[in-house]
Image (cartoon, grey):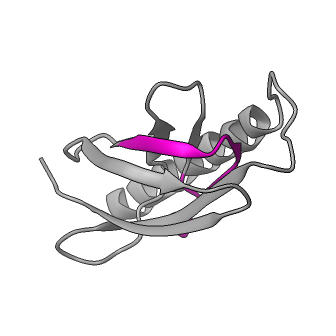
Amino acid sequence: MKNILKISAIAFFALVLNTLSFAEGNNTTTPPSSATAALTGKVLDNITGETLAGVAVAIEGTELQVYTDLDGNFSISGIEPGTYNLVLSMISYKNSLVENVQLEANDKEVLDIKLDNK
């Protein structure tokens, strides 16, 4: 019974975060131009390989941040070309920094990122 409640609470939390991320993604301050890039990927537990829902994925130095969905997937579009660092964070996991992600105009970069438990 306790496990069912825990799973339900986690699923609800992830659903709320996922809904907020889509709401944030549609509220951009600058309209995307045709010379933008996109970044997609999946976040996994480093030991078990399970997908992680509700992980915050932020592009350092910007206001762009999304959360992974129930399958651990994330997507950020409308990114200006350049080199960026990604910061990933989730309760019970160590924060992760993915450095020097290079994005070219009209590129769609795909990343698989593994997080370590605390």
Q: Position of residue 113 (x, y in %)?
A: 35, 64
Q: Residue at x 23, y 44 (%)?
A: 92
Q: Position of residue 97 (x, y in %)?
A: 28, 44
Identify the image quadrant of residue 69: bottom right
From the viewer's side, name the closer residue of 103 and 31: 103
Image vertical order of residue 42 relative to residue 63, above or below: below
Q: Position of residue 42 (x, y in %)?
A: 48, 67
Query: Residue furthest toward the bottom?
Result: 49
In this figure, what is the number of numbered marks?
A: 0
Q: Position of residue 62 (x, y in %)?
A: 55, 26
Asked whether residue 74 is in view, the answer is no
Predominant secondary structure, magenta span: strand
Q: Residue at x 86, y 50 (%)?
A: 34
Q: In the drawing, does residue 24 fall left or right of residue 91?
A: right
From the viewer's side, name the closer residue of 27 and 14: 27
From the viewer's side, name the closer residue of 73 and 37: 37
* The stretch drawn in magenta includes residue 70: yes
Q: In the drawing, does residue 89 fall left or right of residue 57?
A: left
Identify the image quadrant of residue 50: bottom left
Query: Residue furthest toward the left?
Result: 118
Classify the position of the N terminus by image quarter.
Answer: bottom left
Q: In the drawing, does residue 22 fall left or right of residue 1?
A: right
Identify the image quadrant of residue 22: top right
Image vertical order of residue 44 relative to residue 6, above or below: below
Q: Residue at x 69, y 36 (%)?
A: 20
Image vertical order of residue 37 relative to residue 79, above or below: below
Q: Which residues are magenta?
A: 68-87
Q: Residue at x 64, y 41 (%)?
A: 16
Asked whether residue 98 is in view, the answer is yes
